[in-house]
Image (cartoon, coloured by chain):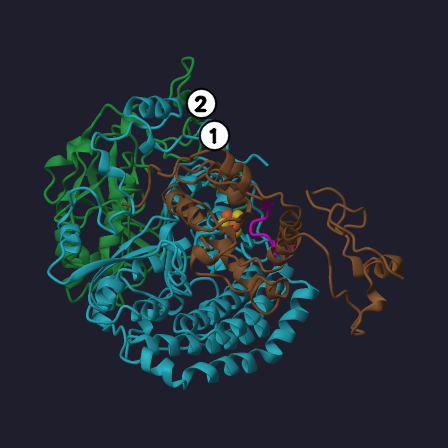
Chain colours: A brown, B cyan, C green
Amino acid sequence: MAVDRPTTGNATDPMPTGGHGPIVIPDQAGDSDLLREFGMDEHPQGGFHGLLEVIPTKADYILDLIRANSLWPLLSGLSCCAIEMMSTATSVNDIDRFGMFPFRASPRQADVLIVAGTLTTKMAGPLVRLWEQMPEPKWCVAMGTCTTSGGRFKRSYSVVQGVDRVMPVDVYVPGCPPRPEGLIYGMMKLHELVKERRGQWRTYVDRGPQRTRWEGDVR
Amino acid sequence: MTGIDPETRIPDPIELDRAEEERLRAVAGLTPVRASGGEYAGFEQVGIPDRPPQTEREREVYTLDEGEMLVNMGPQHPSTHGVMRLVVKVRGEIIVDIDPVLGYLHRGIEKLCENATYTTVLTYVDPMDYLSTMHNEHAPAIAFEKLYGVKAPPRAEYIRALVVELNRIFSHGLMMGFLALDMGGITPILYAFINRDEIVDMLSAISGQRMLFNFFRVGGVNFDTNDEFLSRLGTWRGNVMKNIEMNERMITENEIFRARTIDMGTLTGQQAISLGVTGPNLRACGVPFDVRKAKPYSIYHELEFDVITQQGGDSYARYLQRIAEIKQSIHLIDQIIDKMPHGSVQAQVPGIIRPRPGRAYGAVESPRGLYSVYSISDGGPNPYRFRMRDPSFISLQALPKLMPGRLVADTMAVMASLDPVMGGVDK
Amino acid sequence: MADLRRSRTAAHPLGRRRPLTTPVAAGALVRALAERLGSDLRDLWTDEDTVEYQVDGARAHDVLRTLRDDDDLAFFMLADAAAVDYGPGERFEVVYHLFSWKHPGWLRIRAQVDRADPRIATITDLWEGAMFHEREMYDMMGIVFEGNRDLRRIYMSPDYRSFPQRRDFVLPDDAADSSAAGVRPLERPETWDLTRFNQAPGVTFSPSAQRDDAPGEAVTGGETLSSKSRPR
Ligand code: SF4
């Protein structure tokens, strides 16, 4: 049975991108016709190992899968929420299961900034600087009510009322502090965003130069 | 999802001419830029403030001799235990001077407390020293009870002592883990967090929250013990000794650990008292000051225990002191459970209390030392003045005294042995 | 000897208060203090575990030195040092809590400081650990400690120009509504009295801190921040 290899743009292209429709991975689709279409059982070396040997797809899709499954967070805790973030990273909750264990100490090696804790005016400058040192693509998770809205420090004279005043945020995880399960759920949501390419940093880049210096910057 | 609020977006001032910049700043309600352009130099010259020194000490630190340079550690540094900046003056690898720069986590908690009712204050103080939340609530509760003239029922006092000792155990356990982590050993912190998660799950069974418990009330505690709490406590008590000893075996005799802690950061008792160091750090210098014995509060006069001290005063003694105190706390918990009376856990107190004008001082022994509250009432529903003395804030002053002459890499090892928590340091 | 108890004779209207514990046996301490520092200490007041005196700000350093060095008193540990603001036109107080093995209870010394010209001698020569306390009081209240070698702001950034713990620094009801919008510290013009401290020994400010042309708050439609704020 000789079937022409599909070219890109074919209806059987397993690569729905752009954020619409579910992601279908072909060997899980359960459609044997689809498999046969790829020459599955006629492989010259008989190389049928339960998986497709050749998957016609877009490099972007593969890159997104890789990105989503090895998001390395920046090791940067601001206050109380950081303890729960550490608890999420260690044995009991073990965020390593989702490819997120190596908390990088350098922003140059990090993909996601988990803002864990209260952001003060004095820390705003350094944190924006960290964010800008991270290579793109990058994502930001606001952990705790302090970073989502100011939380219990809503009336304080020295607290930034929500981290989205100084940088784009992809996922908000409320709670004071959020339970580790809450943070893990937030990271699952972030995986979806990454796969669907819906990160906020793009709009952030489009907006042009931002303010990088603050009243309380380090001197 | 708001992203960037367009109102607060200001183009980078450097790229604009001065007039446009001033206009934009005025629109956003910001103060005008200073006359000299270089004042916001930020990190460009590492650590050196771009202004004349304000004080004698600042001039001393920021004036460099031949061969010296400044290194900035922080505010984001993996082992500053939070957000703090250390300006380290080095000659080669040898530290000459240290200037800690604080305030990156200053949240104005005292001011917020002065604008809150007495019950709400107990919520606001939670995120201060976030590894010893129960102690944070204990001191204000004592002070407010003195102000209002109400006493918690005996069972409430026993439950308080139980939860603060549990809190002390996981706080000291984490300190052991962080100390090893700062020397490059990653395993002890994993064991410490297993122990910590067991305890916070237990405490969340009694208080409903995992970390900022908000469990204390003026005149009692929020909930009585329940079955889940007690069964978790029993399970934990069954194997806690084994876990602690396992962690201890891994660290105590480790050759690298000993080489990096023994004779490192040695404080004498006299020096420690003058610097205001309290808690395990002071007892590790041989001074038997423990608020639980010196000025007994709650039910500590009914419990049998001795003040543990170490000789030596170095990082290793501070580490041994923590282990001894964990075992002491387990011993105290056994006694508390034996003696716990029946009865109510909350005195009758109205929701909004208005104490008579007066002053009160409440002090407790937190895992980091003397944690105290000075509160003034003017007869209204909020404290007129609410002041907290946080032990790690004061203990941090020892760091510049300990480090000169040591290697840069030892800074973090010594700092971890002092066990500061930035939430408390910066309030 | 006067009755050391705080007067608690009137029953509370709710009738729910329980009696306090007995006051500390402070007789020996009070006698020793009257003997050594009789002329400086005023207004004795106690509660169940504290003995409190008031002193003049100018005498505070000497009193504390005596308390620390005298063998019978031996208050070797500075437990706390805090500043209290009693509002505009009133006074500041610097409150010291001391600890000694020889006496039950804490000793509290309240030193009065003029609010218009807040200066008091530093005690960093007695206790090195008072340094951070004094820097904090300077930052939050604007009290100048004469002789302190390192009187800088400790929490707020060096160019911050208010003293947030003062009574006339009022928090807005919701910081998100204010013109500051959370990215800039609130400043109130009436608390900008830094220029007055220029003569303090060891305290100098960069010229920018003395400028008085910085706008206080954005005034839109006649509404000021203070009209939005709720007085306490
Ligand atoms: S949200 Fe709560 S736990 Fe998190 S930083 Fe804020 S106060 Fe701390």
Mark 1 neighbour class, 10 Å CA radius: few under 14, some 14 to 19, many 20 or more? some
- Name the foreground residue: A161 vs B173: A161
- Name the foreground residue: C106 vs B168: B168
Mark 2 neighbour class, 10 Å CA radius: few under 14, some 14 to 19, many 20 or more? some
Which numbered disc covers residue C173? 1
Residue B23 vs B144, above or below: the answer is above
Task: Please state which amino acid type lies under the numbered disc 2.
Answer: Lys
**Pointer 1 indicates a residue of which chain?**
C
> Quick one: SS at disc 1?
loop
> Quick one: SS at disc 2?
helix
In percent of width and height, residue A117 lies at: 48, 50
**Pointer 2 indicates a residue of which chain?**
C
Where residue A88 sits, quadrant-wise, is bottom right
Q: Note whether residue A26 is visible.
A: yes
Distance CA(mark 2)–CA(mark 1): 7 Å
In percent of width and height, residue A104 lies at: 47, 61
Label 2–label 1 contact, CB within 8 A: yes
Name the residue that disc number 2 marks.
Answer: C228
Which contiguous range is marked in magenta?
A171-185
Q: Quadrant of the C terminus of chain C?
A: top left
